[in-house]
Amino acid sequence: MSSTEFKDGLIKEIPNLRAFAASLSGSIQLADDLVQDTLLKAWGNSDKFEPGTSLRAWLFTILRNTYYSLYRKRGREVQDSEGTYAERMATHGNQESHLDLADFRKALAKLPEEQREVLIMVGATGLSYEETAEICGVAIGTIKSRVNRARTKLAELLSIGSLDDLGPDRQSAAAIQRVSTETVGT
Amino acid sequence: MNNVDSAMAAPDDGADLDAEIMLDPRVQESIGRSLKAHYDDIVNAPVPDKFLVLLAQLEATERRAAGASTDELN
């Protein structure tokens, strides 16, 4: 793989690296520092990348290790002083849909790190359970269990644990059911 | 590996399995959609120029180094 091919590969992955870094750190500024460190490390270690394997998985491994060794503490400090990116990013854009997104981000930020990272990797990045397990250095069963725990916790935080919380369609369906039950009762 | 052992031995693991069964597929779908919306929102944001500048600099430095070592050989 030539330097130019490798560089083009890195450029293509930058948007995903930013999204993953922001999900991990909870701060878009920290995310960009983290992406920059990841790109520098990747460039310095390009000989260790095996062509034909997933560049995204390789870069996520570097980004994640960098985050846990250098950024985790900083992330907390920034969140404490400036508020999370979830709260700050919620001020612009389409009002109604953004409100939902802002609520979701606040809930996501409340998940334990080990649950949040796997939920993002499995649910949004296109990485497989196998790749996610390899990146995190744990068994696939552990990943599945963390994803389940994360989903359940999110449903709880967003109060969508029951069907009625999902929207008016479900509520009217329930109302219809109540009416028909009452009709049968009389 | 410690992580695997502790996850398997976690006392709330049984409860999690129950929760998984209880969680309605529509709730799961709803979470999945929000997850994608959150992630794609950042993926689709413009990439700051500084990253492209950085990579161009790294490539240029490597070219110069390669050029210099070729010069030494000649």
Image: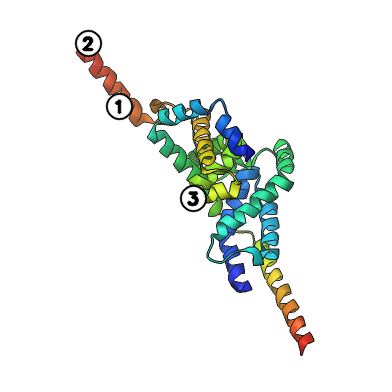
Q: Label 3 near label 2: C-beta < 8 Å?
A: no
| Quadrant (top left/top right/bottom left/bottom right) for the C terminus of chain A | top left
Q: Position of residue A25 (x, y in %)?
A: 65, 44
Amino acid type shown at disc 3: Ser
> In this picture, is B72 found above or below A51?
below
Judging from the image, mark 2 belongs to the subunit labelled A
Identify the residue under disc 3: A128
Of the numbered discs 2 and 1, the one sitting upstream in the chain is 1
Q: CA distance from mark 2 to mark 1?
A: 18 Å
Amino acid type shown at disc 2: Gly
Q: Residue A157 shows which numbered tag?
A: none
Question: How many labels, in total?
Answer: 3
Callout 2: few (<14), some (14-19), or many (20+) C-alpha neighbours within 10 Å? few
- Nearer the observer, A181 or A151: A151
The kind of secondary structure element at disc 1 is: helix
Identify the residue under disc 2: A185
Of the numbered discs 1 and 3, the one sitting upstream in the chain is 3
Q: Is A127 positioned to the left or the right of A62 in the image?
A: left
Residue that appears at 68% across and 38% down: A83
Amino acid type shown at disc 1: Ala
Q: Position of residue A7 (x, y in %)?
A: 62, 68
